[in-house]
Image (cartoon, helix red, strand yellow):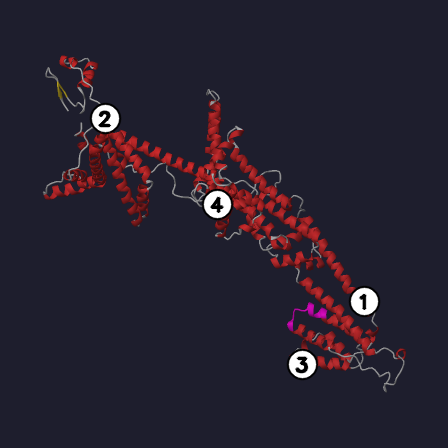
Amino acid sequence: MDVRLPDGTIIKNVPEGTTKADLAAKLKSNGMAVPAEWLQSTPQPAPSKSAVQQIGEELRQIPRQLGLTARYGIEGVARAADIVGEPVRHLVSNPVARLFGWPESHVSIGDIGTNLANSFGLPSPNTPQERVVADASRMVAGSMGMGVAAAKAAVKAANPVVKAVASQMAAKPGVQAVGAATSGASGGAVREAGGNELEQFGASLLGGVAGGLTADKLTSAAKVAGNAITRAFTPKATELVRADQQIALTLERSGIDWSAVPERIKQGMREDAAAALSNGQPLSADALRRLLVFRRAGVTPTVGQLTQDPGQITREMNLAKSGANSTDPSLQRLPSLQNHNTRTLIDRLDEAGAANAPDSIGAGVAGIGSLRSVVDRQTRAIGDSYRAARDTQGRSLPLEGGTFTRQANELLDQANVGSFLPPDIAKKMNAIAAGEYPLTVDVAEQLKTSLGNLARNSSDGNVRTAVRLVRQALDDTPLQVAEKINPGNLPVAPAGVPPSTAQAGQQSIDAFNAARRANREWMQRVEGNPALSAVVDGIEPDQFVQRFVIGKGATASDVRSLRAELDPQAAQQMRDHLVRYLRDKATGGDTDVTKFSGKAYRDALRDLDAKLPAFFTQEEIQHLQDIGNAAKYMQAQPAGSAVNNSNSGALVIGKGLDMLDRAAGYVPLGGKDVIRGVIQGMQQRQVMAPQNALQTAVQAKSGMRINPLLAVTASPANAREDDRGK
């Protein structure tokens, strides 16, 4: 309002409600003359009101406040709509109207809302306090209206970009409302203090951001405090039982049996899972599965290795490189962890047998020696069987030579392979038929041996068939009928009856058949086991393991056959050598340098995959696989990561850290320790928080989520209405 002094001077833009005493003090402070009558008039104190009167006045204000609230709601929603409506009116509707000569629109949606409130007879804010409250209330109403509209748009949107934007605008309505309220109140307060439109805009924007940030932090703090209170009143045993149940359910979906995991590994994982679940998020199946791999391998994972998030891995790897390029040991925790984990993988292989394992020649010597003892033992047993057969009394008894040759010729004619019979065999058959070559049990066994050798050494199927048929006839040939010792079956003393020649002959035949069967079974055993066959034929130790265990030509079946023939000591040495072979593939054979090629290890393990069960239990195989998988996760750089493998940037950062460390030494009051603590804390947060990696990833946190458009609604666009209150 404008105030005219008694001398005619006009003071413009005096806030409503200013008393004469306030105005006199303002004039006096500015060096201006104060009217004498103002100085003579002593303001009388307002009469005090009783408590009943004060309560009555407050009750009288309720209808007015309700009316103001309704006005703020109508105007707030209408002014929020101006964010879309005003650009359309100025850039589309009015240009089209000018093009066709139509009257332009000069009324905004906000003006329509104000007019609607006026038509309802709703009261208007009069005092500065009411106008500031009005600004804040309009902003809150507008933010809530836009939040609801954005939520509906997010549900219906098919375009992923539109859906993402709408979801962002609808997120955290409580924080949105607080940010809108502080935005409106800040802009309105600056306006009431006489600030121009630009100052109002800046204050509104700053107030909205500060209010939203504060509300978001307070909300997060309240959530953390609530979780802490819940944990404080929840028994530790209950938390671990719940964590155990969630782990079992989560891993079951990945095909992993939690009950089969050793208890020593379960204990640590329960602790990590309980800490993750305390934040109210479900467990991540992938991160939990990887954590199980790390725990079984005995190494310490980082958050990035568990999540395999490219951004997290980039930060961890580059931070490790930067620390490694620094000369301060306290900044080298991550590279030290990498070295320790790699050393642990090598140690696990040494503990599994690689440390004391023989080299390939030593393993070959042990394997050949074990198989040679098998060969010698079987050869002696077969020789003893043949010697026993030759010592039988019936080996010189004659067989029915005519029956043999006649049956053999019939079989050859039926198969039409008589012409393929080897000449030596045909000549002996003719001599037997003519009685020139006596066919005794001993001669028949010699002939069977010759037939067997011919069959094995011939590649002609007809020859092998002819030999087999002759052998069949020979097996079916009976002994010659012996003369009866007691034709009339007269009673005689038992000692007076000589032994039956037929029985003696059959015993001799059975003994030879048993010896031959033992030899045949042994030869089949040798032929079915390439390693055993090679030992029979003779092989050098340096070729043995490569040819019959590790090489691609050795099948899983061949390796199982070899393992079945080895004695326990040789089998253990072969098993240990396989672990050493895997370790050498991973380290390149360098035992005094800490390095581990996960890919080379996994490739070697994959080549041995089907052969490992011959020497290892399933649990031992799982341990070898866990070592390879842990190395994979430790060394992975998934798509989207930006690890500085050239080390150039890390070198610069490392030198910068050294400079920062030296500069920190000049900072008083413990500044050096503070700076170091911040840098070390960055590393510790990356490494020592596996429970964070176990939480299922939700929508990325942005610190606060307030609608930036709503934060400036109380801006110059609304100044026309607000200026009326000045």
Q: CA distance from mark 2 to mark 1?
A: 136 Å
Earlier along the polypeptide chain: callout 2 or callout 1? 2
Which one is closest to the eye, mark 3 or mark 2? 2
- Whether tag 4 and tag 3 are in contact, CB under 8 A, the answer is no
Say what amino acid the circle numbered 2 marks: Ser
Say which label, 1 or 3, has the lower sequence index. 1
**Closer to the N terminus: mark 1 or mark 4?**
4
Give how far across and how far down residue 693 sits, in percent: 47, 42
Disc 4 residue type (three-letter): Ala
Q: Nearer the viewer, mark 4 or mark 3?
A: 4
* Eye-nearest disc, 2 or 4: 2
User: Dot 4 corresponds to which residue?
Assistant: 287
257 and 490: which is toward the camera: 257
The residue that mark 2 highlights is 50
Pointers 1 and 4 in contact (C-beta within 8 Å) = no
- Find disc 1 in the rendering and name its residue: 387
Task: Give the mark nearer the N terminus: 2 vs 4.
Answer: 2
- Label 1 Cα crowd, 10 Å radius (few <14 / some 14-19 / many 20+): some
As measured in the structure, the alpha-carbon distance from the residue carrying label 4 to the one carrying label 3 is 76 Å
Q: Which residues are magenta?
A: 452-461
Q: Is residue 615 left or right of residue 698?
A: right
